[in-house]
Image (cartoon, rainbow, N blue to C red):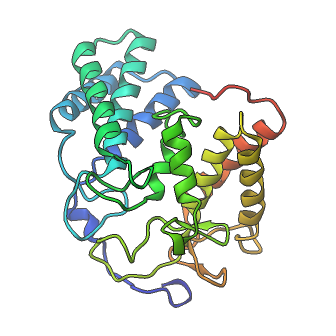
Amino acid sequence: GYRGSRPVRIGNAAYRQVQMDIYGEMMDAVYLYNKYVTPISYDLWQDLRRMADWLCDNWQTRDNGIWEVRSGPRHFVYSKMMCWVALDRALRLAAKRSFPANIQKWTATRDRIYQQVLRKGWNAQRRSFVQHYGSSVLDASCLTMPLMFFMSPTDPKMTQTLDAICQPIAQRGLLSDGHVYRYDTAEAKDGLRAGEGTFNMCGLWLIEALTRAGRTDPKRLTQAHLLFEKMLGQGNHLGLYSEEAGLRGESLGNFPQAFAHLSLISAAFNLDRVLDGLDTHPRK
């Protein structure tokens, strides 16, 4: 691996895994393409409609989650949220384009997913959304909830999740010198060897979540700005970012990583708008 990163694998066990979050990511991309690039075709809509129908019947499937854990399928909060995203964006597309759709079924399922995540994905003791149902483990993927318009950035449950994640790793948070672990490998049972670097993508998710909450809370906006300035120093001399950062700031994991750069662009764009006072309302 890059600069001696371990472990190194030939191939990826994820090809045998189920990852339910991909439907939300794909449908959100199609929704944005239809909105900002060009209207999608009816034939594509037919495929998307079949997918949404399938998701209504299969969203409760356990999966291996965004982090491709090797410890067996679970009900991951991020995966459930992204199933909600898939149906929410399908409903928005159908309404915008007046496409034929199973509106009643999609709406009922979307709402059922939402209520289940709020009921089972929230840990009252940790005062935070957690990695999977029945867990007390924090997970940086929950930072995407306001980015995906699943939760308001100022909802008390979301701000409490931000506060929990912003605690140092030694205090069961995920923050380390301004950088963010995806989860605590010493606490989570993921089937992998404990110990890894912080994830640049997760740090940028935190910056964007703080930015969105910072529209009405100057302290969070200041924290987002400071973390972003620190993140700018994480790139190399060409401004390229790796997947992870080590304890001494060294690049680890995949290099360069597209996910990190996409998150950097999104965080920079949203932070700039809020700091300039141009973005008083979140875009949908």
Residue farthest top in this picture: 98
Residue farthest front in this picture: 125
Question: Residue 186's x, y, as percent?
Answer: 39, 77
Question: Residue 22's x, y, as percent?
Answer: 34, 46
Q: Nearer the viewer, residue 278 or 117?
A: 117
Question: Residue 145's x, y, as percent?
Answer: 48, 41
Q: For the point 54% across and 24% down, which residue is it?
A: 35
Q: Nearer the viewer, residue 135 or 242?
A: 135
Side of 56 relative to 38 (left or right): left
The image quarter in which residue 251 lies: bottom right
The quarter of the image holding the C terminus is top right
Residue farthest bottom in this picture: 4
The image quarter in which residue 231 lies: bottom right
Q: Nearer the viewer, residue 215 or 254?
A: 215
Question: Residue 230's x, y, as percent?
Answer: 75, 65
Q: Is residue 34 above or below residue 268?
A: above
Side of 90 relative to 103 (left or right): right
Q: For the point 22% across and 70% down, which residue is it?
A: 71
Q: How many marks?
A: 0
Q: Is residue 233 above or below residue 193?
A: above
Q: For the point 20% across and 27% down, which residue is it?
A: 53
Residue farthest right in this picture: 276
Q: For the point 22% across and 56% down, which residue is it?
A: 74
